[in-house]
Image: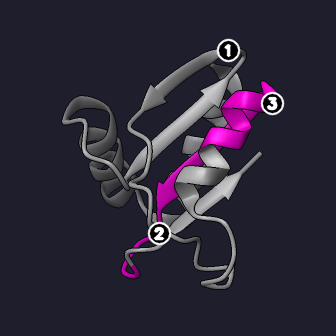
Amino acid sequence: MPNTADWIDKRRVEWGREHVDDCLRNGVQRGMPGYFYAIEGGRVVGTPWAGGAVLGQVSAAGPSVAELQRVAVMCGVDFAAFMREPGTGGVNGAH
């Protein structure tokens, strides 16, 4: 998952290693929703968001993060990643 690794490295620079590594531990190792989830080349890692979580950039009337993740899987995107933003409890998605 080279695109995922690159995206994570960029988040470490932008948001700090401690925050990103904590999100990875929570989403990947502990199976906690709302911390980290990525899709690349048919592989999935992390834990999907709970149904009601909404992206900070999307209005409350917009799709939930869970819905965006479902669409990414259903459409077979090459790459999508979601991680909780530091200090806000929000999320960031890139594809």
Residue 6: x and y, percent?
A: 65, 36
Q: Where is residue 55 in the image (x, y as percent from the top left)?
A: 59, 71
Pick the front one: 37 or 11: 37
Disc 2 is placed on an element classified as loop
Magenta segment: does it hold 77? yes
* Residue at 59% across, 63% down: 92
**Neighbourhood count class around disc 3 (C-alpha, 10 Å): few under 14, some 14–19, many 20 upward:** few
Please state, as top left, top right, bottom left or bottom right, where the N terminus lies in the image. Answer: top right
Which numbered mark, 2 or 1, is in the foreground of this view? 1
Q: Tag on residue 42? A: 1
Marks 3/1: CA distance? 11 Å
The magenta region covers 70-88
What residue did someone put label 3 on? 75
Residue behind mark 2: 85
Q: Residues within 10 Å of mark 2 (few under 14, many from 20)?
A: some
The amino acid pointed to by label 2 is Glu
Numbered disc 3: secondary structure: helix
- Asked whether residue 77 is in view, the answer is no
Q: Callout 3, which amino acid?
A: Cys
